[in-house]
Amino acid sequence: MKIALLGIGLMGLPMGRRLCEAGHSVHVWNRTRSKAEALAPLGATIHTTPAQAVHGAELVILMLDHGGVVSHVLFELGAAAGIAPGTLLVDMSSIKPIEAKDHAARLSELGVDYLDAPVSGGTVGAEQGTLAIMVGGKASNFERAVPVLKVFGRPTHVGPIGSGQLTKLANQMIVGATIGVVAEALLLCERGGADMGKVKEAISGGFADSRILQVHGQRMVDRDFAPRARMTVQIKDLRNALATANEVGFDAPITALFEQLYAQGIDHGLADLDHAGLFVELASRNGMA
């Protein structure tokens, strides 16, 4: 299949690699061309503009930073106008549900079909093809996309347009809060004299176990905060969740608390750390190295 992939960043690069390895004809664009060129040795065609990349594509995939960038690429840089009517566009970026609905409506006027399909699993999941993919849109369009989405991981149709983004927000609310609780619990144990690594080992397999404890908890034990998903990405998702909650008249005090904690960490210079770097903010509050 001829596939256009717009956005070759931390997630887009391994996803593009998997598309090439699956035998698709992959056409890519990225604002910083050098990042896209990393896929050239695998057979991808690099384009100068989004409109060039989507020309003649049977499927268009977006993996961009946020809703504002998606809108800019689609409707200001000419991508939407370059997509042939009847083509399916799958936006795998993490944006607000209201933005997904707006983009879908504007694309529909051009005859372009749409799915919102954000992912969870980070760069490791993108590299291994184990991403959780949350898809909103028509069931018929979901079935069209499934063979390609399975290259990236496990797609699940969760409802109409916007539902994929709503599910991603739920995912990020849980991830953000759980990272905070894991960090606070491990730091408390260290302050009390316990071995943090042994504490993690002891509670593994019990009711407190989770993928966050295993992956992010280990990063905390190792003091490894090299960015996979940055603090700035986590706070973006929490703020999108709070904005969506406000739109539907829902009170989300727990999410609001963690948004404040991530914001304070970013204000203290932690913006480029992995989102497990909330550990550093909590450690600093307690005068711990």
Image (spheres, grey):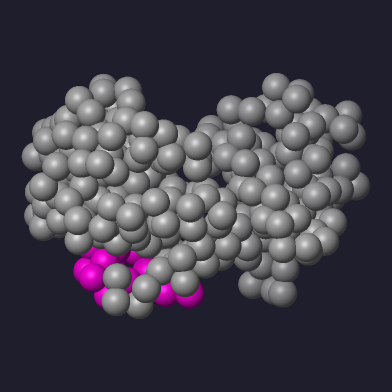
**Quarter the C terminus occupies:** top right
Give the image quarter of residue 40.
Answer: top left
Q: Position of residue 240 (x, y in %)?
A: 64, 48
Would you say 171 lies left or right of 30 here? right
In the rendered image, residue 57, in percent from the top left (x then y), is placed at: 15, 50
Please determine whether, in this image, residue 143 is positioned above or below residue 256: below
Instruction: Count the numbered circles shown.
Output: 0
Farthest residue toward the front?
A: 109
In which quadrant is the N terminus drawn?
bottom left
Residue 288 visible somewhere in the drawing: no
- Horizontal side of 147 relative to 175 (left or right) equals left
Residue 27 part of the magenta-drawn span: no
Q: What residue is at 75 percent from the left and 25 percent from the top?
A: 267
Q: Residue at x 41, y 56 (%)?
A: 104
Q: Is residue 156 magenta?
A: yes
> Magenta span: helix, strand or loop, mainly?
helix
Residue 147 to residue 244: above or below: below
Q: Is residue 124 above or below residue 28?
A: below
51 or 120: nearer the eye? 51
In this rendering, position of residue 53 left or right of residue 287: left
Write the residue at 23% across / 28% down.
49
Q: Is residue 287 visible?
A: yes
Location of residue 92 in the rendering, given as x and y in whole percent from the top left corner: 40, 53
Q: Nearer the viewer, residue 265 or 195?
A: 265
Q: Residue 52's spot in the image, x, y percent?
A: 16, 34
Magenta span? 142-159
Residue at 48% across, 75% down: 159
User: Quick one: 185 or 153, which is closer to the camera?
Assistant: 153
